[in-house]
Amino acid sequence: MGDGTFDGYCSPHEVPGIDEPIEMLSVSQAQIFAIAESGSVFTWGLPGDRAYDSSAKIPKPERVGAFFGKKRLQTLACGRKHYVLITLGAFAPFSKLSWDTKCKHIAGVWCHFDIQTYDNRDIACQTGGYVFTSYLTLIEATSKRDNSHEICVEIIRNMNGTYSGRYRCYLAGSYLLNITLDHLGISGNPFSVNVSPGAIYPPTCLVQWSNPLPLVLRPDNKLSITSVLCDKYGNEVPKTQHSEDDEDVCLCYQIVDNNNQIIIKKSTTGCSIVVEIPTHPGAYMVHIGIDGIEGKHAVQKSPFSLVVQKDKTTTEALAALASKTRLIFPSEAIADEEFVISIEMDNELPDDCYYKIHIESTTKSHQLSARALVRWGKTDPLAPIVKIIRDIAKSIESMVIKVAGSYEMTMSIYNENASYDVGNAMINVIANRAAVEFTQLTNWSSSLAEYEDGVVHSSLHLQLHDKCGNLAINYPQDIVIAWIDTTEEVNTNREELIVEKLSNSVLTIFFPQIKNGGSYIITKVTNLWLHIHLNNVPIEYSPFQLAAKTIEVPPPPPVEARKNYDKLLREEATRRRAEGTLRRERAQIREDRERKQKQQNLRRTGGGFTVKFSN
């Protein structure tokens, strides 16, 4: 009854020990809960069967520490076996976001913010446990450069009703920060965020030249350069920003000759400067930096080549040089192996002239394997090859072509005013010897359907590729062996399968009894492995497991998927996190089910005696 005794009463009496006005009361068979105006919860009586100590009795009202000062109860109902409590939780439209007072929205820097949760009565919550969903969406980028576009948003709970969050991105521009709770946006959602570029970082700064590269000038020419200031992540820093951060941005340059002697060294305040041209003809290097020359002060691609010529070569002289230049080259080359191109000429090459060799494929397709295309990445396998020759002493150039096919080579001589063709020719690049990296089974996925019932009727086709992925020719020196074994290890006591040549690049591997018109049986209880070796080295992914069941083999990724490579990486990371979360939730459900099953072994009835259940 709440007074410490078990006496009955025939008239109302006051329950002692409660010093606060009671707002709500709930009575069960043997226990009473009382909720005060302040949110405190009092209880007395006999706890339920599921209580921590079901035999303990509370003779007088006691404050429940689990709810005091933390949760505000809205409704409470007591039953004979359990209790139902409804608390006031966080309501997204009333929750508010506040930025850190020292927060600066700068690329590559964490920006912090706080979230205060409120319930539907607009009262601040004092408990955590809520999961906010947040993401940052790019609206417009201030820089057109292709730099890293990584975005990260984190929100952690502080267990007192507030949440601390932060975000970071590397691309400057306008963003929208979206924060939701239970699919509802918080107050003010979405939030507009303008991310500014960071501090000036010389190694990513660009240089704009008044003359085209490569620099071939005369002493009376003028040359001016302008620096495009960028931060560490390639975002262009506007003049209004860097003038506030650093009013003394100093652009420096120095010209060094072949003896590593500094000929000219100057600097100026600002982003533009006029470069003095050395008076003596020769080859020089131009070093450019911001607030310095060497190390971290050097701009991107510094130093630059500068050739100061004596006299300007006329158009007639350039044509005469083109007519007296001879190009010696092989008519056939091997993929990924060097071949030599020689240049013969009667006269010396003037300083303002240079040779340009352009090699371009005449075919629009290639014979690279799908696996090789994935490893090529975003690089175009059939991209033209351009070689510029300035030093006549290096009349022999080594070239390497990795993709087999027919190529047209064109050589021309250039100066700043004109150009003449020296000649053109065709080069046939043949595939290299077969390699284990890209040699593959072409009909493996289609043959798997026959393994469902364990009966194999067809053979396997092995397609040979060289180390670059080109379709290779089956040379007599290349030896392919295959066998079936019960282990993954290489066994010297083996019975090799029959391997025959189907075409120039494809070999046929016969299972036992198939060549004679029979079939090969794979039982479900047998674990077999197919070993394929090329020149005593296993091909990639060998050995292959043989099983009497259908194995789904995903198709190779299309070439167009390389454009969305970064998006696919993010989707794969999200999928893996979701699978991990689902796996943990299922484990938790299993643990809860086992714990409940154990608790059901003891149950208390209303009569005061115990009934034990056994499986």
Image (cartoon, rainbow, N blue to C red):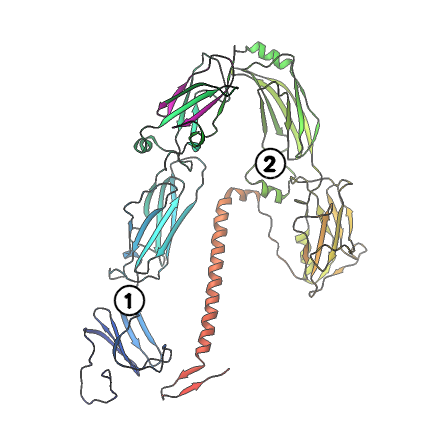
Tell me the magenta residue range.
268-291
Image-quadrant location for residue 368: top right
Residue 379, how many percent across, how many down?
Answer: 56, 37
Say if 190 sits above or below 287 in the image.
Answer: below
Write down the residue under mark 1: 71
Which residue type carries mark 2?
A: Pro
Q: How many residues crowd around disc 1 within 10 Å: few (fewer than 14), some, or many (20 or more)?
A: some
- State left or right for residue 258 relative to residue 444: left
Which residue type carries mark 1?
A: Lys
Predominant SS of the magenta segment: strand
Residue nearest the viewer, comparing 420 with 261: 261
- State left or right for residue 46 relative to residue 408: left
The N terminus, quarter of image: bottom left
Q: How many marks?
A: 2
365 in the magenta segment: no
Q: Residue at x 54, y 43 (%)?
A: 562
Say if 101 sits above or below 612 in the image.
Answer: above
Residue nearest the viewer, comparing 404 with 329: 329
Q: Residue at x 58, y 27 (%)?
A: 386
Helix, strand or loop at mark 2: loop
Residue 381 got which mark?
2
- State left or right for residue 29 relative to residue 503: left
Q: Residue at x 51, y 42 (%)?
A: 563
Point out the frontmost of discs 2 and 1.
1
Residue 62, how many percent across, how many down?
Answer: 26, 76
Residue lying furthest right: 516
273 in the magenta segment: yes
